[in-house]
Amino acid sequence: MKFVTVFLRYDYGDKNRGDSLEYRNWYLGLKELGVDVFPFWYDEYLRNNKKQELQRDVKSFVDGVNPDLVFFILMKNEFSFETLDYLKNRYVTVNWFCDDQWRFDSFTRFFAPYFSICLTTDKFAISKYKGIGCDRVFLVPPASFMLDKNIDFDNIDYEFDVSFVGGWSRYRQWVINKLLKHGIHVECFGSGWGNGRVSFERMAEIFKTSRVNLNISNSVSFDIRFVFSGVKNFGFFMKHMLYEGGGKFAEQIKGRNFEIPSLGGFQLTNYVPGLEDYLTIGEEVATYSSVDELALKIKYYLEDEYGVLERKEIMVNGYKRALEDDFTFTHRLKEIFKKTGIKL
């Protein structure tokens, strides 16, 4: 089997941000499965605004390989409808739409018909695809970039009480500030935070050596305390309210939900519809619904005798579930091939 992958090599096309998830997860996952992969990296075209050249070159590249499948992960409108239609009429084309929870109406519904197969992370969007005539749509949730199969839970040398790994946002900063007022310090890593971005290897270590790993929503919060906590926060909220398709109003399952248990960490996450399809809430993952509940649960899991025992039990159960179901992207790829009938 010959696959062409049309991905960004670096995160958002910026080499300074490190490897992209497309490279780390999908490209390397395909290589691990023994697929003959021909990558078309389009970072340079994106950086230099060479959209016209991109259309010409991607068609020429794919035709030169003559692959069995062309795998896209679109960001925006990098590729024209004419280009996508040209490729679909000659090859099996696939795109993973990973933001359907908040971008289906403003993005996906326009591009989905130009692919042979559509992959979505949102089970609630399946009927929407069928409504626009896309019958070959399959649910493929995010996954973990690795699975640590050798964790000794009795000998973990903890580095942090509470940590968070993810990009900075106004809402996330507000949550961190609220927790600090409750006497809870959270060590934050990622673009926009003081500690900056970390490697995938360092991220894995943080998950394992943090007593509590937070997963904080990146959607627009309707908590009135956040909305009126400052002029910029109010402006941010109104901007998303007034512009159609401009806001992340729906929660979505993230890779973090699978990465933390796969690497032996205890996860305390905001509730996301569909999370219970992959992890048993209260047994394999802990959730919260407000910043006040979050503060309460952090203190419970760190300071209460029964809370500490419960935290350790949830941590181990989540890890066992990750092992049993295999939360890695390599396994997700196997599921894709099985569901779509694509044979390696």
Image (spheres, helix red, strand yellow):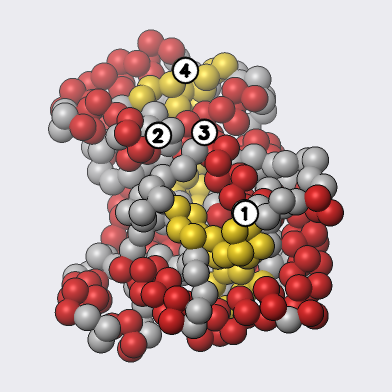
Q: Secondary structure at mark 2?
A: loop
Residues 67 and 167: in front is 167
Q: Horizontal placement of 207 versus 51: left or right?
A: right
Q: Kindly identify the amino acid type of the residue bearing the numbered disc 3.
A: Arg
Q: Residue at x 31, y 22 (%)?
A: 58
**Is residue 45 positioned above or below 340 on the image?**
above
Q: Kindly identify the amino acid type of the residue bearing the numbered disc 1.
A: Glu
Residue under circle 4? 38
Q: Horizontal placement of 32 versus 270: left or right?
A: right
Q: Mark on residue 24?
A: 3
Q: Kindly identify the amino acid type of the residue bearing the numbered disc 2.
A: Gly
Q: Mark on residue 159?
A: 1
State the image quarter where residue 236 is shown.
bottom left
**Which dot, 4 or 2, sits closer to the camera?**
2
Query: Is mark 1 in CB contact (under 8 Å) with mark 2?
Result: no
Q: Kindly identify the amino acid type of the residue bearing the numbered disc 4.
A: Phe
Residue under circle 2? 18
